[in-house]
């Protein structure tokens, strides 16, 4: 009887061990259908020349990748993407950190109003925001151009100026996502021990030292999260203002890797070229993540 009882217990334990895997099956199916299969199919398409209309695909091997690397405008788009990422890291990672620090520890009055005002644009569609900024920043009839005219100044035609166009599109994207990053960082800073901060202030430690030597290290786990999603925003979120405002112009000056992959596939119908560009974009993002984990993650503070 003891042997039978032990066998029954073992069967019961093995059944309990399988329950979590059974519960994961729906999620695995969803990931397989909407993530893994599209990824594998994109890799497959990158080795073919296909226009999404022809019933047959022509196998070209690595020629799509070689064409991308041999095309001068590809390097221009790589540079644009890097520029977007750097700008958004400054606007959507560094500046929200400072804002969160100031509002939490210095501007203690009305901080609820400041938080609400900064977070409000997160509820508004980026398409609506792009159209709104296009009107505000219209260099001829926009409100800002009229104000500049009162002082005898002229706004540049930013949508046709290389450099300016990336900066303005980055501002539009930042207007949408700034508030979310700010709230996340504010919550992290607000969770730091008040006793530690007050002790430093009683010892007349300057605010800039409190920020760099207490706030940054102790909120670094959240900071690295915001750092990573800001890189994603530089690759992905900026697609919407590019599509709505410039369509990648002038002369690819505002395009980035994500938009260019879309343009190649759904405007020029060069599906294989677009798939190869998408794979290269994913590889670049993975390299950035590896570098981040190698050189940045080691200095992160995790409580407990």
Image: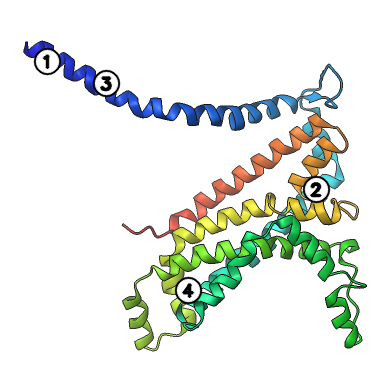
Tag 1 or tag 4, which sits nearer the N-term? 1
Q: In the rendering, at what x and y percent does residue 283 appear?
A: 65, 40
Tag 4 or tag 3, which sits nearer the N-term? 3
- Can the viewer see residue 157 in this picture? yes
Q: In the rendering, at what x and y percent does residue 295 appear?
A: 51, 54
The residue carrying pointer 4 sits among few (fewer than 14), some (14 to 19) or many (20 or more) residues within 10 Å by Cα, namely few
Q: In the rendering, at what x and y percent does residue 231 appear?
A: 62, 54
Q: Nearer the viewer, mark 2 or mark 3?
A: 3
Q: Which residue is mark 2?
A: 75
Badge 3 element: helix
Badge 4 element: helix
Tag 1 or tag 2, which sits nearer the N-term? 1
Residue at left offset 79%, top offset 66%: 133
Q: Which residue is mark 3?
A: 14
Check the image and name the residue furthest to the left. 1
Tag 4 or tag 2, which sits nearer the N-term? 2
């Amino acid at each position: 009887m003891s042997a039978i009882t032990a066998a029954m217990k073992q069967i019961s334990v093995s059944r309990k061990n399988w329950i979590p895997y059974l519960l994961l099956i729906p999620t695995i199916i969803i990931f397989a259908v909407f993530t893994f299969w599209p990824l594998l199919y994109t890799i497959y398409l990158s080795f073919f020349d296909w226009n999404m209309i022809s019933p047959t695909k022509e196998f070209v091997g690595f020629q799509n990748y070689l064409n991308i690397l041999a095309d001068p405008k590809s390097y221009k788009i790589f540079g644009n993407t890097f520029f977007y990422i750097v700008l958004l890291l400054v606007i959507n990672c560094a500046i929200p950190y400072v804002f969160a620090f100031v509002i939490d520890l210095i501007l203690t009055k009305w901080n609820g109003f400041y938080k609400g005002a900064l977070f409000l644009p997160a509820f508004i569609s980026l398409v609506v925001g792009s159209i709104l900024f296009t009107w505000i920043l219209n260099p001829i009839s926009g409100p800002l151009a009229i104000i500049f005219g009162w002082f005898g100044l002229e706004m540049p035609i930013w949508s046709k100026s290389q450099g300016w166009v990336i900066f303005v599109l980055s501002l539009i994207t930042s207007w949408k996502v700034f508030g979310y990053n700010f709230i996340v960082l504010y919550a992290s800073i607000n969770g730091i021990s008040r006793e530690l901060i007050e002790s430093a202030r009683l010892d007349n430690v300057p605010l800039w030292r409190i920020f760099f030597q207490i706030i940054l290290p102790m909120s670094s786990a959240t900071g690295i999260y915001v750092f990573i999603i800001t890189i994603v925003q530089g690759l992905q979120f900026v697609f919407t203002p590019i599509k709505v405002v410039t369509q990648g112009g002038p002369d690819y000056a505002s395009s980035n890797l994500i938009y260019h992959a879309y343009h190649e596939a759904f405007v020029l119908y060069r599906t294989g070229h677009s798939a190869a560009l998408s794979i290269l974009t994913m590889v670049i993002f993975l390299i950035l993540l590896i570098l981040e984990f190698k050189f940045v993650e080691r200095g992160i503070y995790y409580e407990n």
